[in-house]
Image (cartoon, helix red, strand yellow):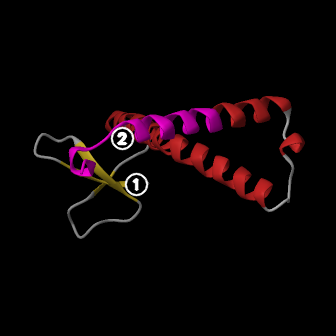
Amino acid sequence: MPYVIRDADGKIVQVFEQPVSGKSEQISTDSEDYKRYVDEHAAHTAEELRRQLAASDIGMARLVEDLVDVLINKGVIKFTDLPPAAGAKYLERQSARERLHAYKNLIVDEKDII
């Protein structure tokens, strides 16, 4: 059975597998308070994990793109080895990256003017 610590209002704020120096009380997993805490905590944790995964998706896309670049440049794979949909997406991203680079070169900072 788990051990819990409650706040001043009696709401569970922490759950432990072992007792915590006299501050915790043992509680049944069938307790409504315990079930409510687990439901709220699980929902919060799942949402946080979803946010973390979404935030890392952009980085992973760039990582995969860079990996494909390296493999193609080293001759490990050929562009034509990619499935058609993957090749199209790769070309789309390469094109967007080139357009962005060209756009950045159009912007001149005042400190760059002689």
Q: Who is closer to the viewer here, 81 or 107? A: 107
Q: Who is closer to the viewer here, 108 or 101? A: 108
The chief SS type of the magenta part is helix
Would you say 52 lies left or right of 98 here? left
Would you say 53 lies left or right of 48 here? right
Would you say 21 lies left or right of 79 here? left
Image coordinates of residue 61 in percent, x first then y, are 60, 43
Q: Is residue 88 above or below residue 37?
A: above
Image coordinates of residue 13 in percent, x first then y, are 25, 47
Residue holding disc 2: 34
Residue lying at 20% horizontally and 62% vertically, measured from the top left: 23
Res 42 seen here? no
Residue lying at 66% horizontally and 49% vertically, measured from the top left: 64
Res 51 seen here? yes
Residue holding disc 1: 2
- Mark 2–mark 1 contact, CB under 8 Å? yes
Residue lying at 41% horizontally and 61% vertically, measured from the top left: 17
Circle 2 sits in a helix, a strand or a loop, which is it? helix
Callout 1 amino acid: Pro
Would you say 36 lies left or right of 50 here? left
Q: Who is closer to the viewer here, 25 or 72? A: 72
Span of residues in magenta: 93-114
State the quadrant of the N terminus: bottom left
- Check residue 108 for magenta coloring: yes
